[in-house]
Image (tube, helix red, strand yellow):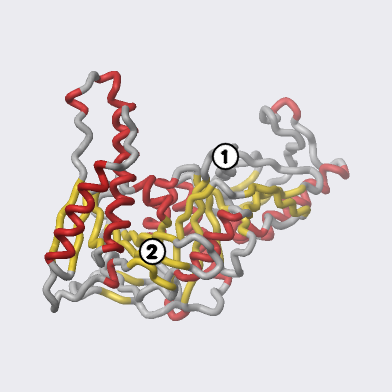
Amino acid sequence: TLRNCEKTDNGVGLYVTPAPKLEEGEHMSIVLLQVRGVNKLSDQMDDIFSTTVAKVAQFYSGYNGEVFRGGRYTRGYFFRSPQEAVCFGMVVQVALMAVPWPDLSEFPPTERNIQGNLIYKGPRVAILVHKSETIVVGLNTNVNSESPPKSHKSLKSLLGRSASDKVSAAGSEQKSGNTTRDSDQTPPGVSGTFTTRRSFKFKSLTMKKAMLAQNRKSFETHAYSGEGVTQASTLVKFVFGGQVVITEAVWREVQERLPRLTQVVSLGLIQVPGIEEPQHLMEISAPGISERVFLDLEANILEPGYRQSPSIDSHLVIMFAKAEPCPLEMYPKENHVELEALHREAIVLWADLVRDLLKQFDGYECKEPDPGKFTLAFKTMDQALAFSVVAQVRMIHMDWDVR
């Protein structure tokens, strides 16, 4: 603990995560959260919600940055890795159900599945995970000697007003000569530390880096804007409470590295108002809450997704199509890394071909459980056969990497 201070509680164990910065040519992952189904959270519930989300974010090295265009109930977290961003989104949905909420009346009713297991409890949070290189990182400065910046609202309630006041009072005493400076024990790299002749109580907040300031200081946080943030802010409005939706850019990065038993549902190709390019969106859910049911997204669906699948009451032709794995055993070990990279590029071309031909032959993509491995459905056998033949011919003439 701090010298000559008495700790009144153990705090929540939050620490300051360094803000991710976007270098030229790099991508950043953004996760936006919006609370649905409530007009306003009480201060107590808002603090519990913010702390719960922050705990999960720090586990995955997420940074809570201010999001322009986000709206009142939008929380933004930024990650270097899309895989960490996706895991954060899924874990948050489960973590919010495990919180001992003091008053559930503020939220929609708790729901259980047929076995009696929880699938909804607490706030309904819509989560959107996006990845972009067009994110602008800026600095948001708030000069205030008493309260933390808005983007860290929960810290004020965790520290407590009285502790903040007492620190300020101790600083005033130092100026008047009632406090002695202990320069010999000043931590390296920290200036302006002080000790006081009398102790005071404080609430604990564990941080990696902290500074007790003698004078008024500027609180600096990072704010994020740009086309990537604008797209994410537009897309999250179409996500339902309790749902986690990821964009195609994120899906391509994480589909081989998702946690076991993760349920993945294609939402189809969506034309969202305000975004020029159509978006291929995927819904993911953690084991245990995969029985949550959502309606179709309220947007123009250009290509059908899982929830627009053909009815099982009519005749269907089911097709299984997959690309062969990379034949590493046929080549020297020193070439394996390059071959695997080339194979992934070829899989992307194959997947694009499949989805292009599905539109031509009125087919339906049931799922892609592994990269390049598809389960497809057609209304007639003629459509399925035509798809197969044309796919083989098109692959002969595709621009494959000759290596």
Q: State the residue at coordinates (69%, 29%).
A: 189
Q: State the residue at coordinates (56%, 77%).
A: 40
Please tell me in which quadrant of the rendered image residue 186 appears: top right
Which disc number belongs to residue 269?
2
The residue carrying pointer 2 sits among few (fewer than 14), some (14 to 19) or many (20 or more) residues within 10 Å by Cα, namely: some
| Horizontal and vertical percent position of residue 226 | 62, 54
Compared with residue 334, is residue 221 higher up or lower down, i.e. above or below? below
Number of numbered discs: 2
Q: Is residue 309 left or right of residue 300?
A: left
Q: Mark 1 falls on what kind of element?
A: loop
Residue wearing tag 1: 208
Compared with residue 26, is residue 35 higher up or lower down, i.e. above or below? below
The residue carrying pointer 1 sits among few (fewer than 14), some (14 to 19) or many (20 or more) residues within 10 Å by Cα, namely: few
Q: Is residue 227 left or right of residue 138?
A: left
Q: Amino acid at mark 1?
A: Lys
| Horizontal and vertical percent position of residue 278 | 45, 62
Foreground residue among 37 and 302 = 302
Foreground residue among 132 and 138 = 132
Q: Quadrant of the C terminus?
A: top left
Residue 334 visible? The answer is: yes
Please tell me in which quadrant of the rendered image residue 311 appears: bottom left
Q: State the residue at coordinates (59%, 44%).
A: 19
| Horizontal and vertical percent position of residue 401 | 34, 33
